[in-house]
Image: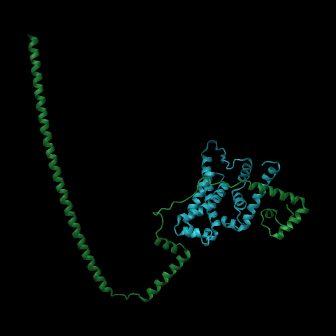
Amino acid sequence: MSCSPFDLRDYILGELAADERRQVDRHLRACHGCHDDVERLRTTHATLLALRDEEIPQRIGFVSDKVFEPSGWRRVWQAFWGSSARLGFASAAMLSIALVAFTFYRPAAAPATSDVTTAARVEAAVAERVAAAVDKAVAKTEARQARKTADLMAAAEQQRQADMQNVAERFSVLEKRYNVERLLMARNDFRGEK
Amino acid sequence: MIFRAVEDPDLIGRARRGDVEAYNLLISRWEKRVYNYLLRITGEREEALDLSQEVFLKAYQHLRKLEDPARFAPWLFRIAHNEAFSSFRKRKVESDVLAVTEAGGEEIGVERPHAFPIELSIAVTTALTRLTEEQRETVVLKIYQGFKFEEIAEILSCPVSTVKSRLYAGLDALKAQLAPLKTRGVS
């Protein structure tokens, strides 16, 4: 434990006032323990400072790109709203204006009965228009669907007839071949008997 | 004609108005200090560089939130401190996961490459890595970056008394390691 009047680490770090430094200097001349301690602190400090700053291996920089730069209007806007104090003040001011405006210009209440009649009439007209539009759309879709089905049926019938004709032709060819084979076999049998 | 050095607050004002070149000039003034601060508390060049880039990007994005441009340095180092400790926490989680998944549950020692090649630098770097993260950071901010106690307290978001106790504990630990080493003639 140091017996110095002030902390020796503050002495080494230059944190003491001139008068405090002088008091420590006087103490160090008389106290060997504190003198040794200061020497060790000085050595530590000097050793630490032997570690030099390094150069940064890669310079840091940003590229100016117009795409990312805020427009003049946006900068003004950000400058205004960037401060929380200004934002708070503006919010309070807007709220006050709204309250005052509401107090002085509050609209008179309109008769309730005419509102109800008008609303019912508008609602009925809207419902009628919606129903007509839905009916029209449904009819149109059904007609389109029926037309598509008829086309598909016709195409399928045409394909079926073409397939039948193809099968008949092939069967005819096969039958002819069979007859030829039978004729050849009969001829060979006749020659063998001879 | 009157010549006047362009001060940091001037550059900050221009950068706030969208002048990227002014911000690049501001970076060129501070990048070395920020990089070396991060290098000494992380011990890794690559990580220090990545973090430095993150720091300057975040600083640019939040430049409008800087109330007093004259306090740019503590504000910038506050961002650097946050980035570094966020990285420490992430690294710790990854290290814990690695330790759990490793067969046999052996302790995983994270080998950090020494950033400074010469013998004395290795001794200093080793001594710094033996401090707690808080002590090391306080020593770096005081000894290498030359901040005042109040500024360090602002950067670390803690009272001046905490800064002093961390710094003194760090210096005592460093003295125990480095002072005998020096007197034995290692230089």
Q: Residue A42's image quarter? A: bottom right
Residue B116, image x and y in percent? 69, 49
Q: Colour of chain A?
A: green
Residue A118, image x and y in percent? 28, 82
Is A21 in front, or is B129? A21
Q: Residue at 85% of width from left, 68% of height from top?
A: A22
Q: For the view shown, which residue lies furthest in the front direction?
A: B1
The chain drawn in cyan is: B
Residue B28, image x and y in percent? 60, 60
Instruction: Give the side of residue A185 with respect to residue A48, left or right.
Output: left
Q: Quadrant of the N terminus of chain A?
A: bottom right
Q: Quadrant of the C terminus of chain A?
A: top left
Instruction: Give the side of residue A63 with respect to residue B135, left or right.
Output: left
Q: Residue at 8% of width from left, 14% of height from top?
A: A190
How has the structure been colored for display? Answer: by chain
Q: Residue at 69% of width from left, 61% of height from top?
A: B145
Is A194 in front, or is A166? A166
Q: Residue at 83% of width from left, 70% of height from top?
A: A19
Using the image, determine if residue B127 lies above or below residue B13.
Answer: above
Using the image, determine if residue B126 lies above or below residue A140.
Answer: above
Q: For the view shown, which residue lies furthest in the right direction?
A: A30
Q: Residue A109's image quarter? A: bottom left
Residue A123, image x and y in percent? 28, 76
How many numbered callouts? 0
Using the image, determine if residue A52 lies above or below residue A120.
Answer: above
